[in-house]
Amino acid sequence: MSNVSRLAIAIALAGASGLAYADGSVNVYSARHYDSDQAMYDAFTEQTGIEVNVLQGDSDQLIQRIKREGEASPADIMMTVDAGRLWRAEEEGIFAPVDSEVLNERLPESMRHPEGDWFGFSQRVRAIFYNPETIEPEQVDSYEKLADPSLKGKICIRSSNNIYNQSLLASMVEHHGEEGAEEWAQGVVDNMARDPEGGDRDQIKGVASGECDVAVANHYYYVRLLTSDDADEREAAESVQILFPNQDDRGAHVNVGGAGLVKGAPNHDNAVAFLEFLASDEAQELFAVGNHEFPVVEGVAVDEVLGSWGEFKKDEVNVSVLGENNPEAVKIFDRVGWR
């Protein structure tokens, strides 16, 4: 079912005035569309007695809806994926800061907006994938090496309008400055095997088919292929190697699935309780495992595939900078001709 269809159904069920709300409820506007999230909502209700009402749509739809609703909005929480999208909501004045001892203690500093505007509750690694028959791992063991001329004509990667790539380039701006990030982006463009097309899974499949030798994608798309009901997809994934880059320095680039308290939330206390629940061990496992993501809270179980990869180093830069650097990243993409 499409995002628009889900949103239309949710609005129809909620009635013309939007979601109903009362003392015993919390209203979540969510751009996450994973069936496993329902188990998380159910667990929160079972633990607290607070009902969770959910309105689904894509991030931009939800941001614009909250703005149109203004002070009459029933929205208590907005959930979405990628720091770039959370930053967009922040810039539109959607969020109100939360100062919670639970969240401050449970969540790493890198996963918390400095002013408490929003919080990261699951981690997504932008990994490198390669053909082990044509590429040695040391050729691609850092993002920086993707710009090396030795990889000319070998890379598959998504378009510049993809938020995951925008955040990756935003991290390069943070670590190397605008000039260094632009030089890197130009090098990747020069090394592309084809014009950007398709989603993350298509980049991995491009390596499996021989269209390219190296790809960049979020790690959980690879797990989806590995565990697919389609034998061809499983075979494609098994022919490709995953690598978490920059293990000798800052660590692999990490993005988030996150949420924040909506300004003027009618069920303020319930909404804060919901955010705090998302940091619990129970919710962390449900939040992350359903989509093969990494939990934010240390020590929470991961699924079998992720567990088989063992420990690795993650970039600990605060994820809020990925949003702050987004405008410059978009400009760089335009300047280097990354479509």
Image (cartoon, grey):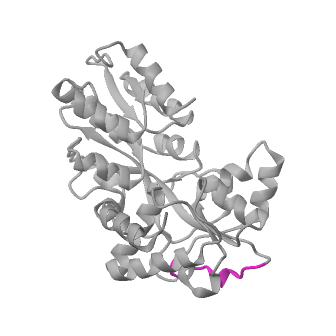
Does the image show residue 61? Answer: yes
Residue 142 seen from this side: no
Could you tell whether 42 is left or right of 306 in the image? left
- Viewport quadrant of the N terminus: top right
Residue at 56% in and 74% down: 245
Of 147 and 226, the residue lying toward us: 147
Nearer to me, 252 or 160:
160
Residue 228 percent across, percent down from the top left: 74, 45
Image-quadrant location for residue 336: bottom left
* Magenta-colored segment: predominant secondary structure: loop
Is 137 within the magenta? yes
Left or right position of 200 against 331: right
Q: Is residue 79 left or right of residue 118?
A: right
Q: Nearer the viewer, residue 15 or 120?
A: 15
Placement of 219 over or under 264, stated as above or below: below
Give the percent coordinates (x, y) of residue 32. 47, 39
Residue range corresponding to the magenta coloring: 134-144
Give whichever of 248, 58 is nearer the camera: 58
